[in-house]
Image (spheres, grey):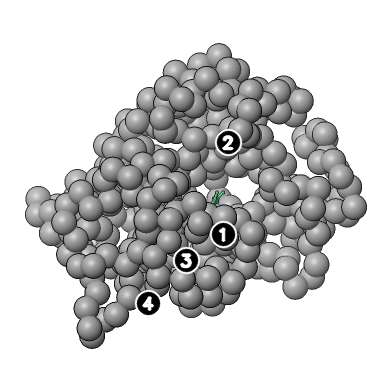
Amino acid sequence: MDQKPPSSWPHVSHVPESFVHPLEKRPGKLFFDTCKTIPVVDLEGYHDRTHVVQDVLKATKEFGFFQVINHGVSKKLMDDTMAVFKEFHAMRPEDKASECSKDPNRSCKFYTSSVNFSKEEFHYWRDALMHPCHSLEEYMQFWPGKPIRYREVVKEYAVELKKLGEKILNLICEGLGLDTGYFSGGLSGDPVLLVNHYPPCPDPSLTLGLAKHRDPSLITILYQEENGLQVCKDDEWILVEPVPHAFVINVGYVLQIISNGELKGAEHRAVTNSSVPRTSAAFFIYPSKDDLIEPAKALTNADNPPIYGSMQFKEFQRNYLSYGANAEKVQKFISST
Ligand SMILES: O=C(O)CCC(=O)C(=O)O
Ligand SMILES: [Fe+2]
């Protein structure tokens, strides 16, 4: 087993053995007819807010995933942010690593495949940059200092995405029958940004960029420009085709718990392609570490008792990390607490 990632992805001419997945874990079908995909919700598309609420709730219930357009984040900011993310990932691996090694607690980090590279049975075809976005005063000093505009641009992006997260969470509140602002404050207090970069892969049928998983967030707001994201719907993988300047929103385990299972996260994964590098930016809306996550009292009663227990977010996170992508184990853990 290779202990080190390929030092220079662009020149890889074959898939190294340690990145080849066992047959049963390979992606299978890579291309689809595109008629099946997730809903696109226009956040400004109706005069009547209740229509938007209905669309959002229908999409979250049916797919756990939807895209949003007319979301209020400027196209220029999205383009500038994607440009600095791509510039970051175009740097030499050793420069990327050194730009992300200033945080003594390693909450800002750069890695290939997963954080557990040296312990993995097989590796994934991606590089990742991860860092917290709250508080900006505390963490910005540990964000990459190169490209030179990184901190300036990503700071504005993080502020705007936090606002968008609140907007979407308030629509979900309304749809579920929770008070507006239920998720404000601690429950959405610690957003984290993960910038995935999937280099072109000489044989996408042999490996994956990211294993199938559900996110450990309340919701995730993803920005992507190229194909690669797939969502599992009724035991079938469907493609999330990029809509220019749309964000992809998905339900995470935390919202599943708080909604008492009314909304459920969907499994998703990233496949690679052989022609273009792909960058995706996931903005995870996480609760603060000490916040308690549990089914909302307003959504449970004698006829609809809580199906999940109550736990601090840090306890959930610790278990999620140790169970990795094993959905059955995570499900068992959240149901038994
Ligand atoms: O690259 C993608 O589209 C998927 C990213 C993702 O699911 C994640 O970072 O959790
Ligand atoms: Fe994800």
Residue 58 falls left or right of residue 116: left
- Which dot, 3 or 2, sits closer to the camera? 2
* Tag 4: amino acid: Ile
- Disc assigned to residue 266: 3
**Label 4 CA crowd tier, 10 Å (few <14, some 14–19, many 20+):** some
- Residue at image position (49%, 51%) is 314
Residue 324 falls left or right of residue 48: right
- Residue at image position (13%, 59%) is 50
**Label 1 CA crowd tier, 10 Å (few <14, some 14–19, many 20+):** many
Whether the residue under disc 2 has CB within 8 Å of ligand 1: no
Q: Earlier in the sequence, mark 4 or mark 3?
A: 3
- From this view, report whether residue 308 is shown above or below residue 275: below
- From this view, report whether residue 196 is shown above or below residue 158: below
- Residue 291, image x, y percentages: 38, 50
Which residue is under mark 4? Answer: 307
Nearer to us in this view, 252 or 317: 317
**Label 3 CA crowd tier, 10 Å (few <14, some 14–19, many 20+):** many
Q: Earlier in the sequence, mark 3 or mark 2?
A: 2
Tag 2 secondary structure:
loop
Q: What is the spatial separation of the Cα atoms under label 4 and label 1, in whole angstroms?
A: 18 Å
Tag 3 secondary structure:
loop
* Tag 3: amino acid: Ala
Please indicate, yes or no, whether residue 286 appears anywhere in the rendered image: no
Tag 4 secondary structure:
loop
Q: What is the spatial separation of the Cα atoms under label 4 and label 3, in whole angstroms?
A: 18 Å
Which residue is under mark 2? Answer: 107
Please indicate, yes or no, whether residue 73 appears anywhere in the rendered image: yes
Which residue is under mark 1? Answer: 320
- Which dot, 3 or 1, sits closer to the camera? 1
Q: What is the spatial separation of the Cα atoms under label 2 and label 1, in whole angstroms?
A: 16 Å
- Residue 60, image x, y percentages: 34, 64
